[in-house]
Image (spheres, rainbow, N blue to C red):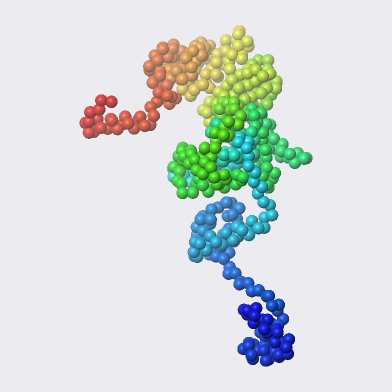
Amino acid sequence: MYRLMDRAAIQKLRKEGWSIRQLARELKMHRDTVKRILKEPLTKGYKRQEMAHAALPYQEQILRWLAENVPVTRMLELAQEDKKEPYQGSRSAFFNGVRKIREEVKAKDKRRFIRFEGMPGEYAQVDWGEIRDFPFVRGEAKTKYFLAVRLKFSRVVFVKWTDSMTQEVLLRGLIEAFEYFGGVPWALVFDNMKTVTLGRDEHGQPLWHPVLKHFCNDFDFMPAACDKGCPNQKGGVENLVGWVKTNFKPGRQFLDDPDLIDQNLDWMEKVNNQVSQGHGEIPWEMLPEEQRKFCKIPCTAADYGLLRSVCSNRDGYVHVEGFQYLVPIGLAEQPLIVRVRESLVDIYHGGEKIASYPRRTEGDGKMTKREVNPEFLETLLADRPKARAMVYRDHLLQQHPEIAAYLSGLCHACRGVENFGPHILKLYAMLQEHGVGELAAACNLAGSEGAFGAEYVAALIQEPPVVRRLLAQLQLGPEVPSQKELDRDLAIYEAFTIRGEDHDD
């Protein structure tokens, strides 16, 4: 590289008549060098050729990792574990190379995030995340999903881990988020998930799922969906899923699902009480300002009923989630509304609730897929005692496995509806008076003694202390002590029997 003054001197002497040979001899240069300098402009600059950065051989993998939001520390580990060409360079060189590749990607992408700030209580972003082969210390790895909801103004985040992404899980999870926030935001921004939108109309507007529309009306908020391929439309809280993955899971071990839930609650408490990079404030301290603007929560996640429009069949049953529920006589082949709650199925006609059943699920141990309320058949059974006994028996069989087992033995001992019919009617009356739990406990005691008959069950059900103790064993009700209490009692027992210690308690 030659200085500007040297290059100017050569060109000046050449203009004065010096030959190429004379210039080369005087300046101690090769003649070709003199010729090249004379052809180039005086202000020619030189740029040092950059060396290939350390991450360049892994550029293809790094581009894929960037798209998957893999942290750069994890990229380094994967590069070092590469079977074909393991990375052996320095940590800083690799990080610098990843930075250059990231900058190149940003330079090629002409789209830019347009960040906007919401008003208190205005927006919340909703996203689903998925982690396959989620590792548990106890049990096999499995796919886990998480629902992430983040408020736009305060940046308070709510995360719920689930085993599926069904519409019911989504909606009940949103209600839990509202309960965590202390109210309902004005608008929720979704991705184009199938449980939210059914596509777009001819004008490009979202076609909202009917169940979601009813949910929005019930909780008084407006839905919004990003245009496909434009996640940046969510504003200043984009990439929520990647943020959760890189902030929650790394460096943690999880024993099982309950431990995952506990650690998630602790993590939410931590991040919501840290200074947010989005606004430099602590989200939890800004939440009260949002709560004053929120809409009210009309019901809890367990009480909310997902709306279903159904039509009863000719036999007077409605089909819900693979099960059949009987409606009152006279409403066969009628359009009805069903509200599917967490543990109940409520059926409505003309705005009035006409039936309510415990919600059936797969694997509940019941013998049939039908639920019958015998009261709906009373007009038909008035002069048909045998039919009444059979309807009542079907109803009793569905209530509890212990009752079903006892009825099996009873019907075997008293063969024929003429013989077991009176017993069935009395057992049904006891069910109405004492409830499922106490009847199941009494049937268990009677069956264990081989005493099959309504009179035996009636005698046992009048012994509350005995029945209640057995009820606690069968149902694990509130009478059952907690594990902490059991551990304490066992420790006292061990001290008494082995070490001979005295304890007043």
Q: 302 and 220: which one is in front?
A: 220
Does residue 148 show up? no
Residue at far left of view: 500
Q: Does residue 272 appear to the left or right of 44 in the view shown?
A: left
**Residue drawn at point x = 48 percent, y = 41 percent:** 270
Which quadrant of the view contains residue 255?
A: top left
**Taking 342 as reference, is 223 left or right?**
right
Front-lying residue, 32 or 252? 32
Residue drawn at 67 percent across, 33 percent down? 222
Please name whichever residue, 498 or 324, is drawn nearer the observer in this view of the structure. Answer: 498
Does residue 500 appear anywhere in the picture? yes
Asked if 172 appears above or below 405 in the picture, the reply is: below
Q: Position of residue 459 (x, y in %)?
A: 41, 12
Vertical relation: 291 (above or below) 382:
below
Quadrant containing the N terminus is bottom right
**Which residue is drawn at the image coordinates 38% and 16% (left, top)?**
465
- Image x and y of residue 387, in percent: 59, 13
Residue 504 left/right relative to 347:
left
Horizontal arrangement in the rendering, residue 117 relative to residue 263 (left or right) = right
Total numbered labels placed on residues in the image: 0
Residue 245 picture location, percent across and down: 54, 47
Residue at the image position 67 percent from the left and 51 percent from the top? 112
Q: Quadrant of residue 484?
A: top left
**Which residue appears farthest toward the top when viewing the image?**
383
Q: Quadrant of the C terminus?
A: top left
The answer to whether 415 is drawn above or below residue 207 in the figure is above
Q: Nearer the viewer, residue 261 or 227?
A: 227
Q: Position of residue 388 (x, y in %)?
A: 57, 13
